[in-house]
Image (cartoon, rainbow, N blue to C red):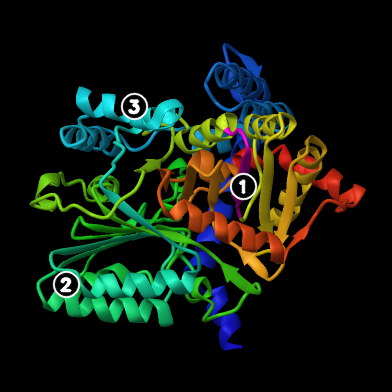
């Protein structure tokens, strides 16, 4: 009974009720005006339906002439023609990609601050061209799109499981001397957080600056509303990203899905792991939870530092001296290859769909093999065509998705993508032991990506994300070895056929997936 009472009066439930009420009022209001308070112009009765339809047509023309994905344009065309009132309201509340003016203005100021530290000189560029060869364009795209450089003096360690990642993270947190910056989509109280929290409290007492930023909507049913204030009182500077209030707004559609830790500007952790017990298999929810991450040491950590400070300062509306957090001297590390951590976010901050384009560049340049793990596979025509084209030109394309779902509808939609991929020659596998949450790609033994970017619309269009592109780093061998093991324990889906009725339902749902 207590559990039911807690759910009914939880923050999440109250927010949902508030939004439903707002939406209901917004949709019903035009009909109420039309029937009880009709518009009269020069003694002529004006049907509000005509006004609404005119607005819908104007809006549709506007949408068609934007750079929105074609799938998104189709979705809005259907919605505005079938339910114009609902479509207009939803568009202006949830889709119109305009951040608060102060955020956009401040974001631009922060971007200018970063530029002075990420200047790429001609000799650096010439060196990259020589060393990267035909792969130079992969990294140059990231620099042109985000301003983030590629580094050589950097070591990368692949952490193949959440448990391994957690142990490495704790060890490095205990060694922090100057600062610890942590940015996570989800933080949930439990064994993982308790161990980290205990270490952070000790570090604060030692004079280490500790900052924690988490996504408010991502934790809405996991943390109390005053969690950030409690941490701040203890000396941990804590910020809620896009603090959620129950008012319908497009801002709430853009979540901070990044998972990063930066320590002293020298060590960085990037992964698919949130801070919650299922990620390290202390709590079992969907069978064995398979995740992965990277421990980065050396110059490339600078990119992660700037990505963190950028969003942190936008939230606080306070511009810092970024140079104060860079290491005083460059320390040579045992390194191999080239490393480029990069970020992505909504189109109003980033000029390109960076994460999707990095994936597309990799897929289109693959020659021998391209292996992918992703928890969700709900992709647009560009990615679908790229993967199919790669397979048709002889590339060994393999994708591993979960066998035990965390979200059944998303799982069903993921499976609905198998048929066209398999027809083109892509091999699909499902992780037999449970839920695979790793987001990683490996290509031809020379390129690899590990990060937070799922192969779905939310990651590729709406969220703030992070990942690391690597060229000929030693850890690529470890990533390939992990893939080879996963193939041995995963289920080959070559004979899988989806129920015709389910396929029909998925086809209908896919019309609206760009909005999700």
Q: Residue at x 71, y 26 (%)?
A: 81
Label 2 and label 3: CA atoms lie apart by 48 Å
Image: 486 above or below 283: above
| Quarter of the image that includes the C terminus | top right
| Quarter of the image that includes the N terminus | bottom right
Q: Residues within 10 Å of mark 3 (few under 14, many from 20)?
A: few
Q: Position of residue 79 (x, y in %)?
A: 69, 32
Q: Are marks 2 and 3 in contact (CB under 8 Å)?
A: no
Q: Earlier in the sequence, mark 3 or mark 1?
A: 3
Give 165 or 17, whichever is nearer the viewer: 165
Residue at the extreme right: 500
Q: Residues within 10 Å of mark 2 (few under 14, many from 20)?
A: some
Number of numbered discs overlaid on the protein picture:
3
Disc 1 on helix, strand or loop? strand
Image disc number at residue 371: 1
Q: Earlier in the sequence, mark 2 or mark 3?
A: 3
Q: Does the image show residue 248?
A: no
Q: Position of residue 23 (x, y in %)?
A: 58, 47
Disc 2 on helix, strand or loop? loop
Q: Earlier in the sequence, mark 1 or mark 2?
A: 2
Tell me: 71 left or right of 327. right
The span shown in magenta is: 366-374
Disc 3 on helix, strand or loop? helix
Give 394 or 459, whichever is nearer the viewer: 394
Q: Residue at x 67, y 56 (%)?
A: 401
Label 3 and label 1: CA atoms lie apart by 27 Å
Q: Which residue is mark 3?
A: 130
Label 1 and label 2: CA atoms lie apart by 44 Å
Q: Which residue is mark 2?
A: 235
Residue at the extreme top: 42
């Amino acid at each position: 009974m207590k559990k039911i009472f807690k759910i009914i009066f939880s923050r999440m439930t109250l927010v949902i009720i508030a939004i439903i009420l707002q939406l209901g009022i917004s949709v019903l209001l035009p009909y109420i005006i039309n029937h009880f308070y009709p518009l009269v112009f020069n003694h002529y009765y004006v049907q509000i339906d005509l006004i609404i339809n005119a607005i819908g047509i104007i809006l549709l023309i506007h949408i068609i002439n934007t750079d929105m994905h074609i799938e998104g344009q189709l979705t809005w065309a259907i919605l505005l023609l079938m339910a114009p009132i609902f479509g207009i309201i939803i568009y202006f509340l949830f889709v119109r990609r305009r951040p608060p003016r102060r955020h956009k203005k401040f974001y631009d100021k922060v971007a200018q601050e970063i530029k002075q530290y990420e200047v790429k000189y001609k000799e650096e560029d010439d060196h990259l061209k020589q060393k990267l060869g035909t792969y130079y364009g992969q990294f140059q795209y990231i620099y042109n799109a985000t301003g983030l450089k590629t580094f050589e003096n950097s070591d990368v360690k692949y952490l193949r499981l959440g448990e391994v990642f957690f142990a490495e993270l704790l060890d490095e947190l205990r060694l922090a001397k100057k600062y610890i910056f942590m940015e996570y989509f989800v933080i949930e109280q439990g064994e993982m957080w308790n161990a980290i929290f205990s270490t952070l409290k000790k570090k604060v007492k030692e004079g280490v600056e500790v900052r924690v930023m988490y996504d408010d909507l991502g934790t809405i049913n996991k943390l109390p509303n005053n969690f950030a204030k409690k941490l701040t009182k203890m000396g941990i500077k804590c910020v809620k990203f896009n603090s959620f209030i129950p008012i319908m707004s497009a801002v709430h559609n853009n979540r901070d899905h990044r998972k990063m830790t930066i320590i002293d500007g020298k060590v960085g952790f990037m992964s698919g792991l949130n801070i919650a017990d299922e990620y390290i298999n202390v709590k079992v929810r969907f069978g064995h939870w398979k995740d992965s991450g990277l421990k980065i040491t050396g110059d490339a950590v600078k990119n992660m530092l700037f990505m963190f400070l950028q969003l942190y300062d936008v939230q606080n509306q306070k511009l810092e001296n970024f140079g104060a957090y860079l290491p005083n001297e460059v320390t040579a590390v045992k390194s191999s290859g080239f490393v480029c951590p990069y970020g992505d976010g909504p189109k109003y901050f980033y000029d390109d769909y960076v994460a999707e384009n990095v994936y597309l560049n990799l897929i289109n340049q693959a020659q021998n093999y391209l292996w992918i793990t992703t928890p969700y596979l709900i992709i647009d025509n560009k990615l679908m065509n790229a993967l199919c084209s790669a397979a048709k030109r002889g590339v060994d394309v393999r994708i591993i998705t979960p066998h035990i779902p965390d979200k059944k509808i998303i799982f069903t939609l993921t499976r609905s993508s198998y048929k066209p991929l398999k027809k083109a020659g892509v091999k699909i596998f499902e992780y037999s032991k449970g839920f695979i949450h790793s987001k990683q790609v490996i290509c031809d033994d020379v390129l690899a990506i590990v990060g937070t970017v799922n192969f779905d619309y939310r990651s590729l269009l709406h969220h703030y994300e992070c990942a690391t592109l690597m060229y000929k780093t030693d850890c690529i061998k470890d990533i390939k070895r992990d893939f080879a093991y996963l193939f041995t324990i995963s289920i080959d889906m070559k004979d899988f056929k989806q129920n015709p009725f389910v396929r029909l339902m998925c086809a209908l749902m896919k019309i609206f997936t760009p909005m999700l």
